[in-house]
Image (cartoon, helix red, strand yellow):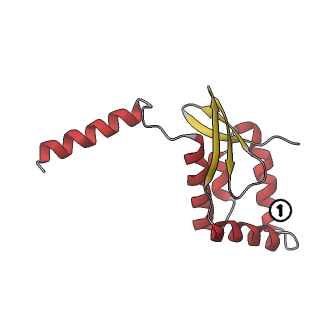
Amino acid sequence: MSKLAVFTGALLITSLTSCGWMSQGPGDTLLEMHSKMCKATSFQPMLEYTAPQSQAMVGTVLALSEDPDKGPKIKADLEAKCKAGVKVLSEKIDGDSASVTLSSEKKPTDMIKIDGKWKIVINKK
């Protein structure tokens, strides 16, 4: 393949991605977050994927995961989910809102799009 063809293909992919034609969907975003959490064996990467109004809830999870009594169980649950693997069971997008059900979760995850990126919204229920 010629260098021009490779360059043109790379330029096309970059253009489509930046225009949103091939942007990451909410399910892809959750899978990416889970992958990072599994690699880190920590909930810390979750902060990057959480909407501002839900940051305090994630902070609570992070604090609990470091608690000497509750932390080992929380980390063991994370490791079990990582070992089992995660896949998207359903994804419903309505404008800048979405609901994604993962194989590792009992309830769907609510998400909103902020500045072109999907973020988790944690609702107290």
Q: Residue at x 24, y 41 (%)?
A: 9
Direction left: furthest residue: 2
The secondary element bearing badge 1 is classed as helix
Q: Where is residue 72 in the image (x, y as percent from the top left)?
A: 80, 74
18 or 87: which is nearer to us?
87
Residue 78: give x, y in percent of width and height: 71, 66
Pinpoint residue 92: horizontal percent, then vertical percent: 65, 36
Residue marked by disc 1: 64
Residue furthest toward the front? 89
Quarter placement of the C terminus? top right
Q: Position of residue 30 (x, y in %)?
A: 61, 49
Of 13 and 51, the residue lying toward us: 13
Residue at figure coordinates x 79%, y 57% from the top left: 61
Whether 31 is drawn above or below 41: the answer is above
Q: In this view, does 43 lie to the left or right of 63?
A: left
Q: Is residue 30 above or below residue 43?
A: above
Q: In this view, does 102 lie above or below 96?
A: below
Mark 1, other Cα within 10 Å: few <14 / some 14–19 / many ≥20: some
- Which of the pair 112/25 is nearer the observer? 25
**On the rendered structure, is 120 left or right of 32?**
right
Residue at image location 13% in from the left, 47% down from the top: 3
Image quadrant in which you'd find residue 38: bottom right
Q: Which amino acid does label 1 sit on?
A: Leu
